[in-house]
């Protein structure tokens, strides 16, 4: 079975190659596509939960705290590598993938003006399948920076994260 068929369980087993870190509230992964460099996703830990409302309140709070941690780490890393970094957008949708997850989208000044101030979902759908922006070795530095910021932030917040070796 391909790890993409069950992203949460593959992350739990350490078989998801996009895994950055395991947080108390979820699995931080870098996006399969990087048309907006630094795009990450926080996967929930319960593969059976299809929406935040499926989680007990304590787990929801842990998940949302982990979203904040990942978003902050992505912001710091993207700001370091690209002076055109603008902001972070966070989306919790679940309309396509029926498991708890949150999208962390860095946004940049170099984005087309007709897209820059709108949700990322207005981008042409081909961006999610473009081989030119597929996650690859060219993203290793950004990936390492995000992971380093996650570790630093988690340590400062007394939140422990489990380290999984990079694939």
Image (cartoon, rainbow, N blue to C red):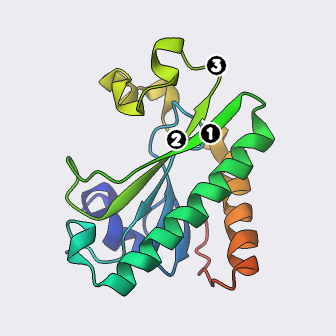
Does the image show residue 130?
Answer: yes
Q: Within the image, what quadrant is residue 147 found in?
A: bottom right
Tell me which residue sits at (80%, 43%) in the image.
80
Q: Nearer the viewer, mark 3 or mark 2?
A: 3
Residue 122 placement (x, y as % from top left): 35, 25
Q: Which residue does the numbered mark 1 point to in the structure image?
A: 87
- Answer few, some or many: residues within 10 Å of disc 2's Cα (few below 14, many 20 plus, some between 14 and 19): some
Left-right relation of 103 to 145: left
Secondary structure of the residue carrying tag 2 is: loop
Secondary structure of the residue carrying tag 3 is: loop
Along the viewing direction, whichever of 136 and 49 lies nearer the viewer? 49
The label number, if any, that marks residue 135 in the structure image: 2
Residue 109 placement (x, y as % from top left): 65, 23
Along the viewing direction, whichever of 69 and 161 lies nearer the viewer? 69
Q: Is residue 104 above or below residue 121?
A: below
Q: Nearer the viewer, mark 1 or mark 3?
A: 1
Q: Within the image, what quadrant is residue 63 found in?
A: bottom left
Q: CA distance from mark 1 to mark 2?
A: 21 Å
- Answer few, some or many: residues within 10 Å of disc 3's Cα (few below 14, many 20 plus, some between 14 and 19): few
Circle nearer the N terminus (1, 2): 1
Residue 167 placement (x, y as % from top left): 56, 62
Does the image show residue 14?
Answer: no
Circle nearer the N terminus (1, 3): 1
Q: Within the image, what quadrant is residue 150 found in?
A: bottom right
Q: Nearer the viewer, mark 1 or mark 2?
A: 1
Residue 29 placement (x, y as % from top left): 49, 59
The label number, if any, that marks residue 110 in the structure image: 3
Q: Is residue 49 above or below residue 117?
A: below
Left-right relation of 159 to 135: right
Q: CA distance from mark 1 to mark 3?
A: 12 Å
């Amino acid at each position: 079975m391909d790890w993409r068929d069950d992203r949460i369980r593959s992350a739990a087993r350490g078989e998801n190659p996009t895994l950055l870190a395991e947080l108390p509230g979820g699995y931080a992964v870098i996006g399969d596509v990087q048309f907006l460099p630094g795009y990450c996703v926080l996967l929930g830990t319960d593969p059976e939960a299809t929406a935040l409302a499926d989680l007990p309140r304590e787990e929801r709070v842990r998940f949302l705290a982990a979203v904040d941690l990942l978003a902050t780490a992505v912001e710091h890393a993207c700001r370091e590598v690209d002076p055109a970094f603008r902001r972070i957008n966070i989306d919790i949708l679940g309309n396509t993938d029926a498991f708890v997850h949150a999208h962390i989208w860095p946004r940049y000044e170099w984005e087309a003006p007709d897209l820059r101030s709108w949700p990322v979902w207005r981008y042409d759908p081909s961006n999610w399948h473009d081989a030119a922006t597929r996650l690859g070795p060219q993203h290793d530095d950004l990936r390492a920076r995000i992971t380093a910021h996650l570790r630093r932030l988690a340590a400062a917040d007394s939140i422990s994260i489990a380290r999984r070796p990079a694939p």
